Each structure stands twice: as structure tokens, then as C-alpha cells.
Image (cartoon, rainbow, N blue to C red):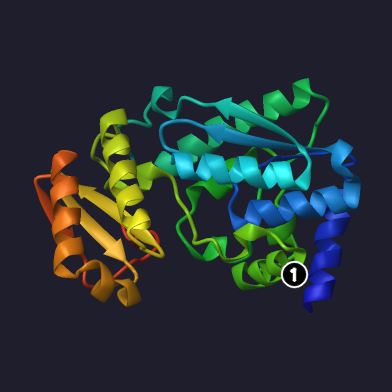
């Protein structure tokens, strides 16, 4: 199936809803889905809903807000206290399942209260190749995945988003802040706040993509190999160490393998 055929298939899935609420993070996948929904259904028949909470970086919230504004759709921001979900803070391997189940339940209820009885998210065809227990939770709740169902890959979605003029077309992949904490280690607001502040610093210093993985009181920095020489210059390195220690990290390390998505995920 070529790209045009995939686009047509995704559009047909969207059209059948009549009205659609989109679980909207502001990333490239959900941005393309939201844009497609407005093209197919009209802005008045589309609602963007963004789940907020301590696991969502402030940068992500701001970018989602801006994209929804540009597309001209109604945008509902909802606080979802993920840490209050039974079992989530203990950080079990099924953490993502618990999180997604709670989020889609809250977003779905809010959507129905506003007359939107179909909810979709921006899962893509590549997601099934990674450890994504949240996909099962969304599927069980009846959340649509028009992009994944049409077979659209991440690379194809970026291509389409660029053609559509979406600023998120080359945005690096994002994940919730809890994904930086190894399974079995308690998730707390204090840890999440420290991780977000550390990653904000690295991004402000020019990191293209980064993760600050938390191992006890040690920060393990993952950045792209091409960024290492620039960010490890003595003055920059010293600033990173100094500011991360001021956040409460006792040791600051650099992972020489570089950034890797899902590096703390369970492996089979």
C-alpha cells in the first residue's frame, strides 16, 4: 500500500466518526492526526484533549497548546493525577498500562460530556515493534488509532506532517517523565521535577534529544552522539555537573552509547 492509499484509509476511519476527540500530546503523531481530523470533519467537529500532570513536561504542554491554536480547534486541557492511580507510583512493569488506562478513561468521559463519542490517539505502525503496554489499554477502551490502522510509519508521518506545514514534523520523540525511572523504583513528584529541570537544562544548552535517567541519586545522561563533543566541552560540562548537583543528584554520568528510546524498558 502506497502513502496515498494509507492516507485515504486513515481519512476514511476518521470520516466514519462524524465527530472526533483526539488525545493530543503535541507530538508529530497526534499533531498529524489532529490536522487530518480538521481537514476531514471540519474544525467544529474536532476536539483536542491534552492530559496534564506531573509526568508531562511543561515544554510539551506549551507546544501542544500552540499547535492546537494554529489549527484552530477547541482544546481542552485536563489535569490527570497519575500518581494517585493505585499501583502507579510503585512503578511496576505495567506502569504504562495503568497510566494509559486512567488517561483514556478521563479523556473519554470529558469528550462524551461535550458530545464527542469517538476518541482517537496518534499511535503509529511502528509502535507495535516496541514495548508499549499502553497500546493495549487504549485498544481495550475502544480508542481509535487511524494512523496505525492505516499502516502509517513514523517516517511517513513525519513526511506528511512536513508537507502539511506542522511545526512538530521533526520534533524528537517524547515520553513521560516517569519513563526515566527504572521499574520498581518509586515514582515521586520530587523525582519527576528533578528530571524535568535537568532535561530542560540540556535542551537549553543545545541537546537535540536527551533523557536523564535516574538511578538512585545518579543522573545518567543520554544524548545523541553528534551532540556529545559540544556538550562535553569543559565549561559546558562543568555547568551541567554543577547545576544537576544543585538539583540533588550526587553523581552525573554520560552514557557513551548515547540516546536510546526505551532503554529502561523490560527486555524479553
Q: Quadrant of residue 181?
A: top left
Residue at the spot of label 1: 163
Q: Is residue 107 left or right of residue 223?
A: right
- Name the residue: 13% across, 49% down: 242
Residue 51 appearing in the image? yes
Question: In front: 8, or 42?
Answer: 42
Question: Where does residue 119 sit, x and y in percent of width and height?
Answer: 73, 39
- Along the horizontal axis of the image, is 57 left or right of 171? left
Q: Position of residue 231 (x, y in %)?
A: 25, 67
Asked if 41 appears above or below 36 in the picture, the reply is: above
Number of numbered discs: 1
Question: Is 189 left, or right, of 53 in this rendering?
Answer: left
Identify the residue at horizontal 61%, vertical 58% (top origin).
Answer: 168
Label 1 environment density (alpha carbons within 10 Å; few <14, some 14–19, many ≥20): few
- For image coordinates 90% across by 45% down, the residue present is 42
Q: Quadrant of the C terminus?
A: bottom left
Q: Position of residue 113 (x, y in %)?
A: 76, 20
Q: Is 108 above or below relative to 209?
A: above
Q: Residue furthest left?
A: 250
Give the image location of residue 219, x and y in percent. 19, 51
Secondary structure found at label 1: helix
Foreground residue among 134 and 193: 193
| Residue located 79% across and 23% down the image | 114
In the depicted view, which residue is nearer to us: 83 or 196? 196
Residue 25 visible to an observer of this rendering:
no
Q: Quadrant of the N terminus?
A: bottom right
Amino acid at each position: 500500500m502506497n502513502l496515498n492509499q494509507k492516507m485515504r484509509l486513515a481519512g476514511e476511519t476518521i470520516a466514519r466518526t462524524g465527530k472526533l476527540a483526539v488525545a493530543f500530546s503535541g507530538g508529530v503523531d497526534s499533531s498529524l492526526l489532529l490536522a487530518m481530523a480538521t481537514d476531514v470533519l471540519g474544525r467544529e467537529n474536532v476536539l483536542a484533549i491534552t492530559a496534564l500532570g506531573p509526568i508531562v513536561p511543561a515544554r510539551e504542554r506549551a507546544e501542544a497548546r500552540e499547535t492546537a491554536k494554529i489549527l484552530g480547534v477547541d482544546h481542552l486541557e485536563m489535569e490527570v493525577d497519575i500518581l494517585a492511580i493505585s499501583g502507579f507510583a510503585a512503578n511496576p512493569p505495567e506502569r504504562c498500562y495503568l497510566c494509559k488506562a486512567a488517561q483514556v478513561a478521563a479523556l473519554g468521559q470529558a469528550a462524551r460530556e461535550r458530545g464527542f463519542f469517538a476518541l482517537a490517539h496518534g499511535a503509529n505502525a511502528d509502535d507495535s515493534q516496541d514495548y508499549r503496554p499502553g497500546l493495549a489499554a487504549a485498544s481495550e477502551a475502544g480508542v481509535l488509532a487511524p494512523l496505525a490502522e492505516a499502516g502509517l510509519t513514523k517516517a511517513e508521518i513525519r513526511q506528511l506532517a512536513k508537507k502539511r506545514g506542522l511545526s512538530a514534523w521533526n520534533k524528537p520523540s517524547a515520553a513521560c517523565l516517569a519513563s526515566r525511572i527504572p521499574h520498581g523504583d518509586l515514582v515521586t513528584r520530587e523525582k519527576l521535577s528533578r528530571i524535568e529541570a535537568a532535561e530542560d537544562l540540556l535542551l537549553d544548552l543545545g541537546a537535540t534529544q536527551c533523557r536523564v535517567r535516574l538511578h538512585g541519586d545518579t543522573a545518567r545522561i543520554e544524548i545523541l552522539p553528534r551532540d556529545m563533543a559540544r556538550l562535553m566541552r569543559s565549561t559546558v560540562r562543568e555547568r551541567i555537573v554543577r547545576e544537576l548537583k544543585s538539583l540533588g543528584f550526587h553523581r552525573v554520568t554520560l552514557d557513551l552509547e548515547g540516546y536510546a528510546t526505551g532503554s529502561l524498558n523490560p527486555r524479553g
